[in-house]
Image: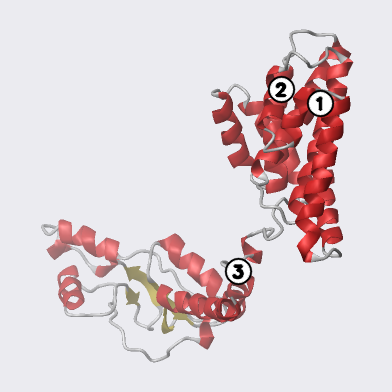
Amino acid sequence: MVAAAYVRTRRGVERLATRLPPWCRAGIGGLAVGLMATVVVMFVSPGMGVGILGGGHGAAQIAITGAEWLPEGGGAVQVLLLLALAKLVATSWSLGTGASAGVFGPSLAIGALVGGAFGRLVQLVLDNPAIDPGAFALVGMGTFYGGIAHAPLAALVIVCELCGSYDLLVPLMLAGGIAFVTLRRFTLYPSQRASQMDSAAHPKHALRALQTMTVGSVLVRDRPFLSFSPGTPMSQVMHDVGETNGQDSFPVLDDDEKLVGMITPDSLRVMGAERDIEPWTLAIDAMRSPVTATVDENRRDVAERILAAGLRVVPVVDDEGRILGFIDESEVAQTYIATTRERLEPSQEGD
């Protein structure tokens, strides 16, 4: 809830700042932050000014370990929540009006303050002095930043390294996972995309192009290729393969020219290593089950099949199993590169 409020507050200040003259935006933001810090330092506690002004590392340290001036019991909860609210507003005004500042440190500080306040509240409600509010502050730190940055694993590792221990790994995973799911509509970084499909580096229409383009649209028919019958001696296979360029998978056809198997590079390597059994083996002994495609399939499905089979090329067959041609991974890659270039070039020219 606090993370969502932080994002909304910052966006609200940014919209407000667009209505102000550019020359005074940063000045108004600095004045607002300065007045807030002055009021807090004068009427609450001198030690709290450092938490509002600057990155907030001192405030995070107070939430974790406490301070001499921090009151006990419910007073500490109130002070930490007040400081978290003040830091949230001050950061929003600083960043929203165009000041040069970061978001990482303040996010950790706000998360630590809220977590520390919650930990002290739980300690009071359960009347259990064994509860360590500092642990809640550390979990709050990672959960707050990881949730709105949509980077739960990075936040988890950062917090564990900061405290020098992985004892909080499980609560960090639980709280961070919940925050990651519930804060999907809120992001700390306006330019962040929801997924790779929405990223310019992974254009979704390029993937859709592979899904909508069929194998038949790029198939070169009547391409000459070397094939064997099941009874071809392996000595003849090895000889013919050695005389062939540009083909690394060889179909095995029956008497009706239907595909019954394939001799792949792996098969040839095995036979090359077992030269003593080559005179007694046939093509049917070295072939594997065929991996094929049809003209109506989309190229993305075929690409996944090629990768799963560990091949570079697969034959395209008709309904009766006769070979119409071949499709290889390079043709799929060319389609992806072409559609990606169409998406990226306009934005690069605009930049």
Q: How is the image coloured?
A: secondary structure
Of the residues shown, which amino acid type is indicated by label 2?
A: Ile
Rendered view: 324 above or below 167? below
Judge whether residue 159 can be spotted in this image.
yes
Q: Point out the frontmost of discs 1 and 3.
A: 1
Q: CA distance from mark 2 to mark 1?
A: 9 Å
Of the residues shown, which amino acid type is indicated by label 3?
A: Ala
Callouts 2 and 1 close, C-beta under 8 Å: yes
Task: List the residue tagged with mark 3.
Answer: 200
Judge whether residue 111 can be spotted in this image.
no
Q: Residue at x 31, y 84 (%)?
A: 225
Q: Is residue 6 left or right of residue 230?
A: right
Q: Residue at x 38, y 66 (%)?
A: 311
Task: List the residue tagged with mark 2.
Answer: 62
Callouts 3 and 2 close, C-beta under 8 Å: no
Q: Quadrant of residue 120?
A: top right
Rendered view: 5 above or below 157? below
Q: Point out the frontmost of discs 3 and 2.
A: 2
Of the residues shown, which amino acid type is indicated by label 1?
A: Leu
Camera-nearest residue between 103 and 323: 103
